[in-house]
Image (cartoon, coloured by chain):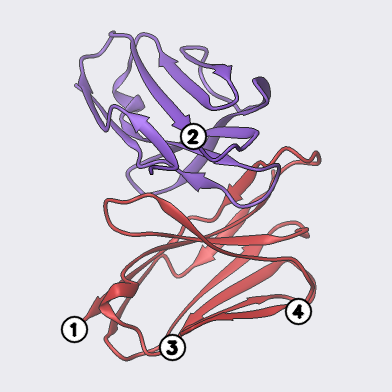
Chain colours: A purple, B red
Amino acid sequence: DTAVSQTPKYLVTQMGNDKSIKCEQNLGHDTMYWYKQDSKKFLKIMFSYNNKELIINETVPNRFSPKSPDKAHLNLHINSLELGDSAVYFCASSRATYEQYFGPGTRLTVT
Amino acid sequence: GQQVMQIPQYQHVQEGEDFTTYCNSSTTLSNIQWYKQRPGGHPVFLIQLVKSGEVKKQKRLTFQFGEAKKNSSLHITATQTTDVGTYFCAGPGGSSNTGKLIFGQGTTLQVKP
């Protein structure tokens, strides 16, 4: 059973398009996260939800909007994609502030 | 703002050699976590250290948390090709208990057979 799953695994799109990434966890965790990993492998947190409530909202352009329909799901919608958005996006989950379990990642390429 | 720095950025070793990566935080940490990311993979949790001066071992991996709780290290004895990947340290960020982690830049380990 996959603990944290993300779809799609790869996303290739043109500048200006809108796209969504979905994440689901079956670990029963109460906190979920979105991270962006750039080409230099730097991992930066973007958002975090705890029990469907947004608790971390880092300095991220308004074009990025997370949504958590329930504790097990966290989606990321990106409007008007730009070249600089190309990266690997990881979803993660944790029980409170304990270790985080990462999904397989979504490699986004904007052309 | 709070920073977590890791050195070196890259390390190439011959199989069988030892490897160490160092992590330094600009602030005192309540705990530090270590993750490993294999090439093309996702970060996987290795360990969490909580106590000042704590040392934990996992087979050939030894993790240390500094006395001042501002630095940490990961030492691998007799590296194997399966150790290849990027090792990240991460400390809690911000003042509230949000689960936010500040990651170091990572140390990428290459092991030559």
Type of amino acid at the residue the image marks with label 4: Gly
The answer to whether B78 appears left or right of A13 in the picture is right
Q: Residues within 10 Å of mark 3 (few under 14, many from 20)?
A: some
Please tell me which residue lies in front, A1 or A92.
A1
Residue matched to label 4: B53
Q: Residues within 10 Å of mark 2 (few under 14, many from 20)?
A: many
Type of amino acid at the residue the image marks with label 1: Pro
Q: Chain of mark 2?
A: A
Q: Is residue A47 above or below residue B52?
A: above
- SS at mark 4? loop
Q: Residues within 10 Å of mark 4 (few under 14, many from 20)?
A: some
The location of residue B9, given as percent across then percent down, is: 41, 65
Of the image marks 3 and 1, the number of the one nearer the N terminus:
3
- The quarter holding residue B29 reads bottom right
Type of amino acid at the residue the image marks with label 3: Thr
- SS at mark 2? strand
- SS at mark 3? loop
Marks 3 and 1 belong to one chain: yes
Type of amino acid at the residue the image marks with label 2: Gln
The answer to whether B110 appears left or right of B58 in the picture is left
- The quarter holding residue B15 reads bottom left
Q: Residue at x 72, y 75 (%)?
A: B66
The location of residue B85, given as percent across then percent down, is: 34, 64
The alpha-carbon separation of the residues under discs 3 and 1 comes to: 15 Å
Q: Is residue A99 above or below residue A104?
A: below
The residue mark sitting in front, 4 or 2, is 2
Q: Which circle marks residue B77 in the picture?
A: 3
